Amino acid sequence: MGESRPRGETIVEVDARAAGTAISPDLFGVFFEDLNYAADGGLYAELVQNRSFEYRSADRSGWHALTAWELLERDGAAGSLTVSTAAPLHPANPHHAVLRTVATGTTGSGAGLRNEGFDGIAVRAGESYDVSLFARLPDGAGNRLVARIESRDGGLVHGRAELGPVPGHWERLSAVITCETTDPDARLTLTTSGVGTVHLDLVSLFPQATFRGRPGGLRADLAQAIADLKPKFMRFPGGCLAHGQGLGNMYRWPDTVGPLHQRRQQPNIWHYHQSMGLGYFEYFQFCEDIGAKPLPVVPAGVCCQNSEVTGQAGIPQEEMPAYVAEVLALVEWANGPADSTWGAVRAAAGHPEPFGLEYLGVGNEDTITDTFRDRFARIHDALREHHPEITVIGTLGPSTAGQDWERGWAFARERRIPVVDEHSYKSPRWLLENTRRFDAMDREGPHLYVGEYGSGRNNGRSAVAEAAYMIAMERNGDVVRLASYAPLLARRGSIQWLPDLIYFDNTDVWPTLNYHVQRMHSVGSGDTALPFTVTGAPEPVPVRNDARATVLIGTGADTRAEFTDVTIDSPGGAPVPVPEFGTWHAESGTWVTDGSGGVRQTRSGARAELLLADAVEGSGYAFSVRARKTAGDEGFVLGFTGASPDHRYRWKLGGWLNQSTWLVRVDDGVEDDLGDRVAESVETGRWYDLRIEVAGRHIRCYRDGELVHEVEDVRPEPEVFAVSAVRAGSTDEVIVKIANATPASVVVRVRLAGTDDGADFARTVLTVPPDAASRFGPAPATPVEDRLTGTVCDIPPHSFTVLRTRGRGPR
C-alpha cells in the first residue's frame, strides 16, 4: 500500500478484508409532504377535484364549495346547483351539492354538473375507471344519474355509465366506465334523468390501474418512480404540514383513517386543500408495498412557529393528556393486534396484521422554547414508558447551526432522545464545504436524521454536491441513521418550493438529476463502512476574490420602498463617489427617481433589486443607505461584495412575512443563512439608517446605529473529490462511490486489500455539465452502466460514479 503512484493518477485503497464499521441499514429513504400538490392531484390517484364540496376561502382566497364544479343545462334542460349543510353525509364532511332540475331538455335529461379535475382529467383508451358517489333523492323523479367522461368542450363522450336508482337516504352508488379514447384534458359530468332534486357528495373517479391495483389507491407511474428509488424508509406527512398553521390546523392522524367520508378535511399550510384521501392507512400500505419502513411524524404538541395565525403555540395543558393518548394510539393502530381498540380500526380497513412501526418522529423544525420542551417531554416520556420498542426522533430546529440547533442538541442529550432531525437546504458549495461535519459527531450521543436537505437547484452542480454530501453521510453511517431529500414531488403549475426530486403533470413523470443521484446511492447501499485512503485527490479551485464589489438596494416580496443618501467608504474611510440612482441597473422591480436624489421601488409582487456594479475596490469598505418602507408585506434587501446575483451577500430586513432580519451568503444562486435570525420587523413609513461594514470575511450590520449582526464568514475547504467504500453483506460486494465536483477528468486506480489483481467492476456513472438543469422534461443525463475490467478508470468531470465488485470478506 506504500507503492508510488503513476503521475496524474489518484489512488483509492480499500481494505476489503477489514471488519469495518456497521452503518445504518435504513440510511437513505424518502420524505413525503403534501406540498406542490403532492397528494391530491398528485400521488393520490383521485381524478375529481373538490369531490366533497369542502373547498373554502380558508384553503385559498377565492375558493368556495363549488370550486372546480359548474352547472350543466344542456339541450334546454334547466336547473340550479347549490351547496347545503343540512343533514350531511357525516359531521366531518358537512357540505354536499344540491342539484335541482326544473325542466328536462330535448333528450329527456335533466340538469347536471361537471368537474374539471386537476387541470383536466387524463384518461386512456381501453382503461377502466371506477366512478362512485353518495346520493339521496329528497323529491322528484330524476332518480337516476348518468356519468360521462367527455372532452373538454363536451363534443365527444369517451365513456359512460348509469348510477341508480337514487334512494331517499344517503347511499353510495358506483359503476365502471371504460374509455374509448385517450384524452389528456377530459371532464367528468353527471346528469339526472328527470325533474327533481338530488343531493350529491364524495363524487369520485379513480383509475383501476393504480399502483399494485389497489382500489382508491395511488397513481401508478408516480408511485413506481418512488418505488424505484428503493427507499429504506418513508417519512410522512411532513414537514411543516405536520404541525400546521395554528393549533387547529395540526395534522391529527386519527382524522385520516377510516371511511373516506368520515375523514376531517382541512386547509393545507401551503394554501390549498387536504382531502385526506391519502391518509395514514394509504401511507402505511404504500410503505409495505415498496419495502420501506414507515416513519410518521406527529406534532410535538406545538404548531409551526412561522404560523401566520399565532406563531408557535402549545396545546393547552388540560388537553395534553388526550393528545399524548392520541400519539400512543398511533402505535397501537400500527402495531397492535386486530382485536385491540385501534388495531381493530386498521383491521377494518383491510390489514389485520400489524404494520411493524419502528420509528416515530415527534416535532418538525420547532424552535426550542420552554413550551416546546414541556410538550415534547410529555410525549417522549409516555412513549418511552409504554412503547420502549419505538425509536423516537426529535428535532434540532430549522437550521444546521445557531441557538435553536445548539439548544436542540442539548435538549436531546438531556432527555436521551435516540435520534434527532436536522434540516439543511443549502447551496452546492455549502454541502461540499461541510462533508466532514459528521466526522466529529459524538458516537455516544444521539444519532442524526438528516430529514430534509437539497442544494437549491435541479442542475448538475447541485446533483454532484448532493452525491458528495450523501457520501459523507455514508462514511459516518454509524451515527447518521437516516437521510431523506426534500421535497419529493412537484406538480407542474402548482409549485411552491424549489427544487424537488420528481416533477409531474397529469400524463408525465420527470425524475431529475438529483433523483438519479438518490437512486444510485440507495441501490448501492452497504451495511459496513470499510477503511480506505485516497492519495493524489484533486484540490479545490480557490474562491475568486473580485477586484471590485457590487452593492445593491432592494425590497422583499410584494413590498414598496424608497431609498436615499447612499454612501460608500473605501478602506481608511475615504468616501467613494456614488453615481445618481438613474445610472444604477435595475435587475428587477420598477425604480423611479424622485428628483431630490432618492429612488422609489413601486412594483408589487416579487423581490426587486437595483444594483451598482463595481462600486468599490478591495475587500474592505462600508456601505450605508437610508430606507423607508411605503407599503407591502416585507422589508428591505441590501446586497454587497458579490459580482453577480449568484454570488454575493444579502442583508434581509423584515423578511419571511416581515417576521425576521438576517444575513445570508449566496453561492450558486442559493442562500445560506449566516448566524441566527433576529425577530425584528420593518415598520411602514419609518426611515431607517442602514450600514454594512466589510473587512474581508468580517461583516457588521447596523440598523439606526445599533449592531444587529457580526459575522466572521470563515469557510472550510470544499471536498471536491469525495469517496466512500462499503461492503454489502447480502451480496458480498464492495461498493466504492466517487463524486467528482471538479471540471477535470480524474484517472483513478482502485486497490482492494492492498492488491490490484483481477478486479472486475460493475460501473454506474452519472455525468452532467454543472449548469445543465432538469425539471419539466427528461433529465439532461441519466446513469450509464457498463463493466470495467482492471482497476484503473476515468472519473469524468462533474460526475457521480458507483463501482461494485465482489469482496473478499473480513479477516
Image (tube, grey):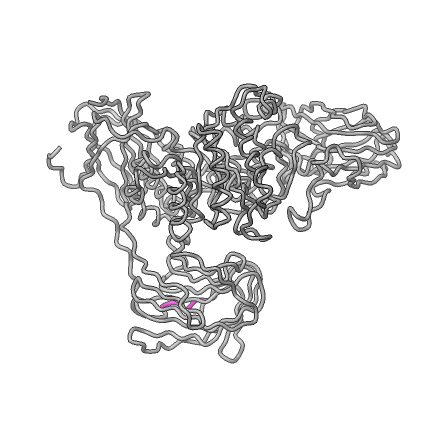
- Residue furthest bottom in the image: 596
Q: In the depicted view, which residue is nearer to us: 413 or 810?
A: 413
Is 199 on the left-hand or right-hand side of 617? right
Q: Is residue 449 visible?
A: no
How far from the left and from the top, in percent, is residue 368?
45, 49
How far from the left and from the top, in percent, is residue 210?
58, 26
Quarter holding residue 170: top right
Main secondary structure of the magenta stretch: strand
Specify start and end residues of the magenta stretch as a single range: 610-614
Q: Is residue 702 visible?
A: yes
Is 144 on the left-hand or right-hand side of 61? right
How far from the left and from the top, in percent, is residue 461?
36, 46
Q: In the depicted view, which residue is nearer to us: 295 or 303?
A: 303
Quarter holding residue 219: top right
Residue at 34% over, 29% down: 524
Residue at 35% over, 61% down: 711
How far from the left and from the top, in percent, is residue 415?
41, 40
Q: How many marks?
A: 0
- Residue furthest left in the image: 3
Is 145 on the left-hand or right-hand side of 741? right
366 versus 809 height, above or below: below
Q: In the depicted view, which residue is nearer to us: 23 or 520?
A: 23
Quadrant of the snapshot with the C terminus: top left
Is 719 on the left-hand or right-hand side of 594? left
327 versus 406 height, above or below: above
Quadrant of the snapshot with the N terminus: top left
